[in-house]
Every structure is written in structure tokens, then in C-alpha cells.
Amino acid sequence: MQSPEDIWNDKNLINALQRNGVAVMPTDTLYGLVGKALNSSAVERIYNLKKRASQKPCIILIGDINQLEKFSIILPEEQKSALQKYWSFDSAQDLRPRATSIILDCQDKSLLYLHRGIKTLAFRVPSPGALRNLLLKVGPLIAPSANPEGLLPAKNISEAKKYFGSSVDLYVDGGEINDKASKIIKLHKDGSVSILRE
């Protein structure tokens, strides 16, 4: 088992993701089944592995707020200042009270494979700096929990391997993880929010 910094700096992990592979790795909350969000074949592979309902978008991890532009999302100042309550914009700062995923409007038709016709996407800037650095290196990752739909999230790598066997490219062991899924909020254009999952 590696330390969190080593996990997210792992050359095998970086290589697998840059080659559009799919990995199971610790995120800032649970073990995630991760792949590049801007690669439609990696995204479809994750949907198939999870047996995820096709109309349900996945949460996307981003390294910083600028990566939203890759999804044709330009935020007005009201939304940017609201986001600062939930996400750390300072790369030297690891602190935020609770992992929070934020739903934003996404009208880009070329991203239909991501927003599944709902025209919104959920994003999260993770708190740990080493994980943000990985995302800046390899690009945004979709990161649903590491379990088939309807089953409990894997708490360790052996549970993940029971679920997915040899059908993922890499498993990254971060020990036992018993955290909970992120809070989810919808951010409206005026900067107000609705809480969808505490």
C-alpha cells in the first residue's frame, strides 16, 4: 500500500490514464472507477463495467476551475464566488470541510456521451493537492464509485477485484477506505445553490 502522494504520482497510473485506460484508484472520497472524461470510449467502458443506467451522468474530477472550459463551461462571477465556498482554489491548500460535487449546466452537444441528454454535469475539485496534480497532468476523470450499480462501493482493492476482475487496466491500492460519497449541490446562474445530497 502506498501513501496518497505516491498513489496519485504513480507512473503506471499516469500512463494507463494517458492511454485512455480505466483504473480503480482511491479518490478524495471512495475508491473510484476512473477514466478520461474527454475520451468517449473510456467513458462507455466505465458505464459497461458498472452496468450503470445509461441516462445517469457520472461525477467528473477536475484539477482546477479552468478545466471547466474543456466542457464549454464559462462561469459568471456570481457562480465563481459561490464555488469558492466549496472548492479550494489554492494549490497549496488541502483543506475543505467536505468533498462537494457541483452540478453545472452543460449545453455542448458533442458531450452528449457525458451529460446523457440531461445537459448538466457534476464536477468536483478534490481537496488533496496530489490528486489535483494528477488531474492537471492527465485531464479531467470521470470517477463513479468502484462497484456495479446496486452493489456497495468497494472498500478495498480485493473487493474491487471481485467486482471487476481483469476487465480494468490497473488497480491502485490505497488500503481500506470507509469514507462516504460527496455532497452534491446544483449551482444556479445567480450563484444560489440547491442541495441534492447531503
Image (cartoon, grey):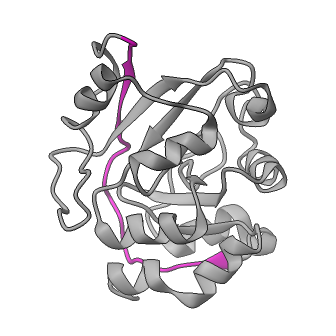
Quadrant position of residue 139:
bottom right
Question: Would residue 27 be found to the left or right of residue 44 on screen?
Answer: left
Frontmost residue, 176 versus 114 = 114
Whether residue 197 is visible? no
The reply, left or right, for residue 25 in relation to residue 185 is right
Residue at the spot 56% in from the left edge and 52% down from the top edge: 143
Please indicate whether residue 45 sits to the left or right of residue 135 in the image: right
Q: Give 186 or 64, whichever is nearer the viewer.
A: 64
Q: Position of residue 146 (x, y in %)?
A: 57, 56
Quadrant containing the C terminus is top left
Q: How many marks?
A: 0
Q: Quadrant of residue 9?
A: bottom left
Residue 10 drawn at (x, y percent): 51, 86
**Residue 179 covered by magenta stretch:** yes
Majority secondary structure in the magenta region: loop
| Closer-to-camera residue (57/39) | 39
Q: Is residue 16 rendered magenta in the image?
A: no
| Residue at 35% in and 73% down | 130
Residue shown at 37%/49% (left/top)?
125
> Left or right: where does residue 126 sit relative to residue 46?
left
| Residue 97 at x, y percent in the picture | 15, 46
Image quadrant in which the N terminus is located: bottom left
88 up-or-down from 155: above or below: above
Q: Judge whether 18 appears above or below 193 on screen.
A: below
| Residue 175 image offset from top left, x and y in percent | 38, 77
**Numbered range of the magenta stretch:** 170-189
